[in-house]
């Protein structure tokens, strides 16, 4: 009778152990399949990055090398090459004309007028207008902060 209980208990124990091992095997198989997929994707991405321009290649370098490279801020973020086609079409249309030549008007201005008003083309179209406005507002804000100190 004791042997029957022992056999029954051993069977139950080994069945639980078998079920646990089977579940673990299924999980490991699933992880292995997902890992293989990720590794294949990584190889595809590495190939794409290596064929891309040099800015992407820097991401593959160790971080210490990236930090040691002196980074220059990107200038001219809005270049003719980066303009969307709809905006480019607008600027190349017949409706858009270049700014007029103010050389004749500049020649007629006196020196005090030029000093007071600046160049005529700046009065007509100032490419630094938004930067100047931002700079003026920042200086005013800094004056307020300085006054509070």
Image (cartoon, rainbow, N blue to C red):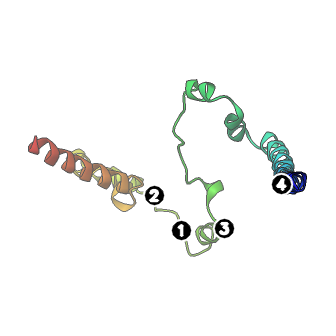
Residue visible at 53% across and 43% down in the picture? 75
* Quadrant assignment for the N terminus: bottom right
Tag 4, which secondary structure?
A: helix
Identify the secondary structure beneath mark 2. Answer: loop
Residue indicated by mark 2? 101
Residue at the image position 80 percent from the left and 45 percent from the top = 42
Q: Quadrant of residue 58?
A: top right
Q: CA distance from mark 4 to mark 3?
A: 77 Å
In the image, which disc is placed on residue 9? 4
Which image quadrant for residue 147? top left
* Residue found 87% across the figure and 57% down from its top: 8
User: Which residue is more in the foreground, 66 or 13?
Assistant: 13
Q: Nearer the viewer, mark 2 or mark 1?
A: 1
- Discs 4/3, front: 4
Q: Nearer the viewer, mark 1 or mark 4?
A: 4
For the residues labelled 4 and 2, say whether their Cβ atoms are less than 8 Å apart: no
Q: Which mark is residue 85?
A: 3
Instruction: Quarter of the image for the C terminus: give it.
Output: top left
Dot 1: within a 10 Å radius of its alpha carbon, few (fewer than 14), some, or many (20 or more) residues? few
Closer mark to the observer between disc 4 and disc 2: 4
Query: Upstream in the sequence, badge 1 or badge 3?
Result: 3
Rounded to the nearest angstrom, the CA distance separating label 1 from label 3 is 18 Å
**Mark 4 vs mark 2: which is more N-terminal?**
4
Residue tagged 1: 97
* Gap in angstroms between the C-alphas marked 1 and 4: 94 Å
Q: Residue furthest bottom?
A: 95
Mark 1 or mark 4, which has the lower sequence index? Answer: 4
Residue 69's place in the image compared with 136, above or below, is above
- N-terminal label among 2 and 3: 3
**Residues packed near mark 3 inside 10 Å, few (<14), some (14 to 19) or many (20 plus):** few
């Amino acid at each position: 009778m004791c042997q029957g209980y022992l056999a029954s208990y051993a069977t139950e124990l080994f069945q639980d152990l078998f079920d646990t091992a089977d579940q673990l095997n299924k999980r490991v198989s699933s992880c292995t399949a997902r890992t293989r997929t990720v590794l294949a994707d990584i190889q595809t991405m590495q190939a794409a990055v290596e064929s891309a321009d040099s800015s992407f290649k820097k991401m593959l370098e160790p971080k210490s090398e990236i930090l040691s490279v002196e980074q220059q801020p990107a200038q001219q973020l809005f270049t003719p090459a980066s303009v969307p086609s709809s905006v480019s079409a607008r600027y190349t249309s017949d409706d858009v004309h270049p700014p007029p030549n103010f050389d004749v008007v500049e020649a007629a201005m006196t020196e005090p007028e030029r000093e007071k008003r600046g160049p005529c083309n700046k009065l007509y179209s100032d490419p630094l207008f938004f930067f100047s406005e931002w700079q003026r507002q920042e200086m005013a804000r800094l004056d307020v902060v300085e006054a509070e100190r």
